Image (tube, rainbow, N blue to C red):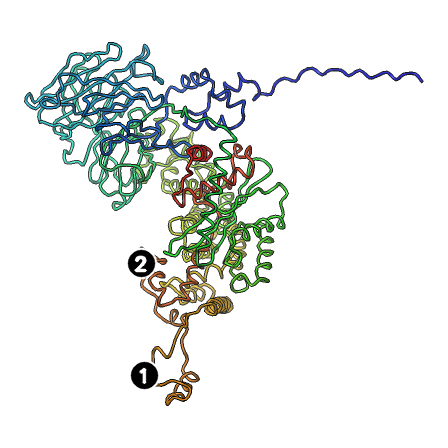
Amino acid sequence: MPRRRRRRRCSAPPAPPRALEDNDLLADILLRLPPHPSTVARAAAVCRGWRRLVSDPGFLNRFRARHRKLPVLGVFMNSNGYPIFRSTLDPPDPILPKRLLPWRNEDGVWYLLGVRHGRVLIFNESRREYLVWDPATCDRRCVAAPPMFDGKKRFVCSGAVLCLAGEQGHAQHGECHSGPFQLVLIGVGEEERRAFACVYSSQTNEWGSFSSAAIRYMDTAFDASTLVGNSLYWLFDDIEGGILEFDLGTQNLNILEIPPDMDTGCSNYQIILPEDGVFGIAALRRFSFDIWERKVGHDGAASWVLLKSVKLEEITGLSRDERGHMIIHGYDEEDNVIFLRTNIGCFRVELESMKYKNLGKSGFITTCAYYPYRSLYRNKGFTLDYQMVWNDCTEAFEKQKLIVQDVLRSVDCKVSLTADTLTTNGTMGYMCITCHFISADWKVEKRIIKFFVLEAQYNAVEIFSTVHRCIQDWNIEQRLFGITIGNSVANDTMADMLKHNLVLKNAVPVEGKLLHNHCASHIINMFVSDGLNFVDSIVCKLRESVKYIRSSKARRKNFEKIVAQEGISAGWPSLDMPTRWSSTSCLIETALEFRRAFDALALQDANYTYAPSFEEWERIQVVCRLLDVCYEATMLISCASCRTSNLYFHGMWNIKLTLDREASGVDNNVREMIKEMKRKFNNYWEKSYISLVIPIIFDPRFKYMFVEFRFKQALGAEAGKSLLRVQKVLRDLYNEYSSQSNDCNVDLTKHGGDQDMSTADNGPFTDWCQYLSSNVEVLSELDRYLNERPIELSEDFDILNWWMVYTPVYPTLARIARDVLAVPASTVATESVFNTEGRVIGDFHNRLTPETVEALVCLRDWCQDSGYHPSRELATEFIDILF
């Protein structure tokens, strides 16, 4: 046979490298990442190739050089003889305070004098030396105190550290870890009644000659310095002493006068930069916040101008009680931001826009100044080893899981679950199962007990199998009271399967009638989506209207004039975040307040073509009322600090009343929208009203009387059937719990006559006891509770505390209340309830194995709820980075 020729294979040309496999291109991409503390660590966690790239010193130098304006990582404060650090960044960027405390084990008292340009200036009183410290690189430089300040007759009151790197000097620097610096010390002399300034340069390693200026008062305290142009400014503790100015170029020290019209009885002050190269004063008064600007004319004469005066409630949105005695604690001169202390926490306020952010209370000291710290922080000690991370996190997860299991095992009540679905940008999702209960001291508690993958084509059987196995693994099958899940066909089928399984085992109360609870947040978001879709074109007009009046100073000024003519005093309209309907609701509400102004603008400005018509204004007003009631209901349902189920009925009932009220409108299109909303609401209500009503009966302010009143008020004669169903479930629930109790509701022998009278079978009062037992009706706990008049309404009423106090009076009802009040109405986390796109897991987490994700999610939840932290630092930092 002829030999078959082997077909020759043609070698294909090499494929071009993919973008992310090109190290040069990838480096250029990664250089554009934000300069947050977690950026490099998160990039290193993607894969080995990325880790090698971002660990290269050359890349890190380019990364630092690119980001000239560095982020504020947090603030330094003085505390009991040494400075401490408190991060102000959001997760996953907060820096552990212990990483920025290198002097804690050293002797002496350390006093913080200033923070600027990535360096910290600290004074050691016992050693009489100054420490210049770079937290990012841990570089330290000690400088001996100048001879002129002996600490007795002349002593230092304040100081500043500045960078001298680059041709442009300290004003426009990037990171200058290795560059030269200078120190400026400000002190006073008791005998001379003068202020003194002295400068140290790291280039010469010497202190320069000092300058001085006469001071009006012998003040020994100064606020933190503010850098304006090429001068440093300090305020005397006594504001009438004036302003201390030190010119870094001429090194002259001057005293400037304060605004003559400024109220010197203000609580405190801060030198600020209202404009580039110009300095001013922020004065925090009792009811307002004033900003003064110092202007210098062509003739050199200086004058003060009051730029703005803002009411305190407009700065932070807090009431007078929440604000308390507000104090300015610090100032960030690069972002023109102040730090305010209030009763409920520290606030960061942008002075130009007056936008604010609550930084919380924890870690902020209320009796000292805050020094903002900017830098490009990267923990050099953090090297990511996947096996070490996995071992560390697994060890911590397994250890804490045993503790959580012991907690749930020791709980002497039933528990409820929530099953929340989280999607990914890929084809799979996750389900998070959280266990909710009320502890023995009557506090609402929760723990995540399962976080598992949902494959692309998951079905009810698979979900049921995993959920049921989780319930058995955690040994809560016989103690399950309810489960709250999202609204989908698969979830409903799963809940029916779980109910059937548990009812056969007699494991749930009242044959599972209270087991399945539909997520109220999902229902509310459905209403909101319907409403916003209905007015989508009108909302777009409102967005364009806001953009129009903000597009130039002339248009803004013209609109301000119209607003003044119309007598409108509301806050300035701002754009919304389209993915958060609460933000869109604020946009609509604010726009409605400016309705007359927008209509007047349309008549005066031919270029403005976005004004809604009269019919559109009326439609969006209806939607605004619906959004308001949905917002209030959502806040009741999702508020983590007061999640007891007695509150849920009120929020959902208000939605029902609003839908009924708006259904009688004159606009046919609006009526059709409301009709569709009512159809969805009625479907939810029919399935859920029993679960909403039972908890409110256990609220001693309302009881069954309130339910009866509301149902008859809204449903009239049709209320009877629903009320009978409520009564039956309530009685069955009580009888079931009562039969399990060892306590007698009424023991006649304890309330009889003298104890020495015989009540034996053959005693003289046997016939009397038999008569009582057959003719006197003994009221049960439930009847006694319902027959008593509801207590007075009070806003600060604590229902859990009430039941804890009245447990001896109603022992069986207290057991029921403890189980009923712990049932959540929503599966959605508080921070995601207003998100119209649902909860999404980031792409980064898709690269981790499901077991790793579950360990990290659960461990993070357990750390937050119990105060537990892994023993190994690596696990702690890795969890912070991921989330």
Q: Where is residue 874 in the image (x, y as percent from the top left)?
A: 44, 32
Task: Work out whether residue 60 or residue 785 is closer to the camera in this orientation and state it.
Answer: 60
Kindly identify the residue that appears in the image at 57 percent across and 42 percent down: 453
* Amino acid at pointer 2: Ser
Q: Which of 404 and 510 is in front in this view?
A: 404
Toward the left, the furthest residue is 191
Picture mark count: 2
Badge 1 element: loop
**Callout 1: few (<14), some (14-19), or many (20+) C-alpha neighbours within 10 Å?**
few
The residue tagged 2 is 794
Residue 356 shows in this picture: yes
Q: Which of marks 2 and 1 is in front?
A: 1
Q: Residues within 10 Å of mark 2 (few under 14, many from 20)?
A: few
Image location (x, y in percent) of residue 802 = 34, 61
Q: Indicate whether 471 appears above or below 292.
A: below
Tell me which amino acid carries mark 1.
Asp
The answer, for residue 717, to whether it is visible in the render is no
The disc placed on residue 756 is: 1
Q: Can you tell which mark lies on residue 832? A: none
Q: Toward which corner of the image does residue 709 lie, by quadrant?
A: bottom left
Q: How far apart are marks 2 and 1 (CA)?
A: 47 Å
At numbered mark 2, what does the secondary structure look like: helix, strand or loop? loop
Residue at 51% over, 68% down: 721
**Position of 9 compared to 879: left or right?**
right
Identify whether 135 is placed above or below 880. above
Residue 833 percent coordinates (x, y): 46, 45
Mark 2 vs mark 1: which is more N-terminal?
1
